[in-house]
Image (tube, helix red, strand yellow):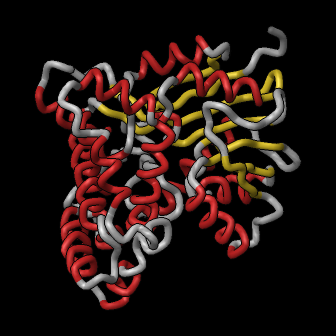
Amino acid sequence: MSSSSGVALSSVQRGALKGDTEGKTVKEYSTLWSENNEQKGVQDRKANYSIMTNQYYDLATDFYEWGWGSSFHFAPSYKGEPLASSISRHEHYLALKLHLKAGMQVLDVGCGVGGPAREIARFSGAHVTGLNNNAYQIERGEKYNVRHGVGHLCDYVKADFMKMPIRDNTYDAVYSIEATCHAPDRVGVFSEIKRVLKPGGLFASYEWCMTDLYNPENPIHKIAKRNIEIGDSLPNLEQTTSVLESVKKAGFEVIEERDVAIPDSVNPVPWWVPLAPSFSVNGFRVTSLGKLCTHYLTVCLEKIGVAPKGAVETHEILLKAADGLKVGGQLGIFTPMYFFVARKPLQE
């Protein structure tokens, strides 16, 4: 790993956690996963979803940006396509499905640091408002908007997506990219999205789900699911059929739905390939070797006080996530991109 990489990584977690000298945040987050009774653990995590998710992104945001960039999501690829290009194309596909164009007001639910919002705004000309309950991510997103000259097309609302401080029938379109999996109740978050969407407006989403191939009695399947949930701050991963039913229960008319993660003739490279050891040097940071190098460097930086307390434990949580995601993807029991487009009825 180059010296410039070491300098860049030394800034990891010196933002949101710069005042956490005892590593309190990562300790509090970890306690939500120490429950022996799994059913009670799910209930506790759903009850504390807002705190849990905020703690997670305070811990993980800098690592995400270091290893992945400002768009925190996966994407299928065609052969030879760079990861960054795949991610942008994945965002463009969503914008096209929503028929976005200049002058439209669009809501990005669970926007992260705003990478997709900026890309979609530039691509479509629509104004995109990112909704996020994490102050640190919004702070970073606002800086990026200025840096990239899209402040006139992108802004943010700090709010819980289960209770949005937004008037009914406000937005022309709404989308979510791998975000509502953090919700304690999919029907609840989809109902809020429907409320703020104009009648006839479209909602599109990429959802994290277990597939029909998941067997809760299979120990390998259970471990992969558990690692994804722990490593990505998810109360409980639902199956695709359950998520689709939640969209309908919220009152949407489903226009189309499919698992975009299934390779086809256009996108034959699976979404999980960036997490596999054979991934190209262009994505070194997210390969097994790259993650190992990052881990040992983080250990050193924490020991000498450059990285904050809890940086190593945070990286271990993310390594657990990466392992669960890779296994889940390879076995076909998990998808990060169950895709649907739904319409809010003109009359109810």
In x, y percent, where is residue 197?
77, 29
Q: Which residue is depicted at the point 64% across and 20% down?
A: 255
**In front of the other: 35 or 79:** 35
Viewport quadrant of the C terminus: top right
Q: Position of residue 207 (x, y in %)?
A: 48, 33
Q: Where is 188 relative to 4, above or below?
A: above
Q: Nearer the viewer, residue 338 or 216?
A: 216
Residue 69 vertical position relative to residue 219 in the rendered view, above or below? below
What residue is at 82 percent from the left and 27 percent from the top? 168
**Residue 327 place in picture, x, y as percent:** 21, 41
Is 67 rendered above or below residue 241?
A: below
Residue 206 visible here: yes
Residue at 57% over, 34% down: 205
Instruction: Answer left or right for 93 relative to 231.
Output: right
- Residues 260 and 71: in front is 71
Left/right of residue 325 with respect to residue 254 in the rendered view:
left
Residue in the picture at 62% in, 33% down: 204
Q: Position of residue 286 (x, y in %)?
A: 30, 63
Residue 242, picture quadrant:
top left
- State the residue lying farthest toward the left: 219
Residue 83 visible in the current orientation: no
Residue farthest top in this picture? 348
